[in-house]
Image (spheres, rainbow, N blue to C red):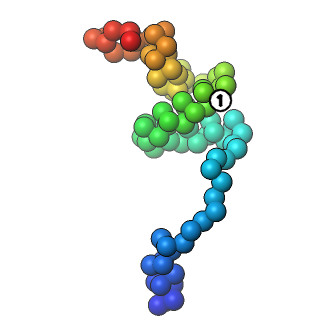
Amino acid sequence: MKKFKNLIKDHSKIKYDNPSAYNLDHDKAETIWKALMDSNNIYEAQLLSKLMIDQGCDGINIENPELILLFWKEYLEENNILCLMPDDKLH
């Protein structure tokens, strides 16, 4: 048990040679985005949807129209296509 505790304690000092970016297919990214939304990690889901859209995402295969709108919300607002807040004006 002591050896395990030392391993955990020293873990933060390990220098990893991780890649700067990962390749992830669309279906997996979509699954992760939906899981983030389902677990109420809205900020993280927005970051992922922005990355997906910036890399050429044309759509997501989700039947829930509310989730589809949430996927595209920031893109639509930033590009002055749609404003979802009644008091907001387009940018």
- Alpha-carbon neighbours of circle 1 within 10 Å: few (<14), some, or many (≥20)? few
Compared across the picture, whether 61 is left or right of 80 comes to right
Q: Is residue 82 visible?
A: yes
Residue 48 pos. (x, y %):
54, 36
Kindly give the residue lying farthest to the bottom in the view shown. Answer: 2
Compared across the picture, whether 53 is left or right of 5 comes to right
The residue where tag 1 is placed is: 55
Residue at 58 percent across and 42 percent down: it is 32
Frontmost residue, 36 versus 43? 43
Can you tell which quarter of the image residue 50 is in? top right
Q: Is residue 66 visible?
A: no
**Rendered view: 58 above or below 88:** below
Compared across the picture, whether 19 is left or right of 80 comes to right
Residue at 48 percent across and 9 percent down: it is 81
Kindly give the residue lying farthest to the left in the view shown. Answer: 87
Quadrant housing the C terminus: top left
Can you tell which quarter of the image residue 25 is in? top right
What is the three-letter code of the residue carrying label 1?
A: Gln
Frontmost residue, 19 versus 71? 19
Residue 45 pos. (x, y %):
49, 37
**Rendered view: 20 above or below 72:** below
Residue at 49 percent across and 13 percent down: it is 79
Q: What count of labels does the image hold?
A: 1
Q: Secondary structure at mark 1?
A: loop
Residue 88 pos. (x, y %):
31, 12
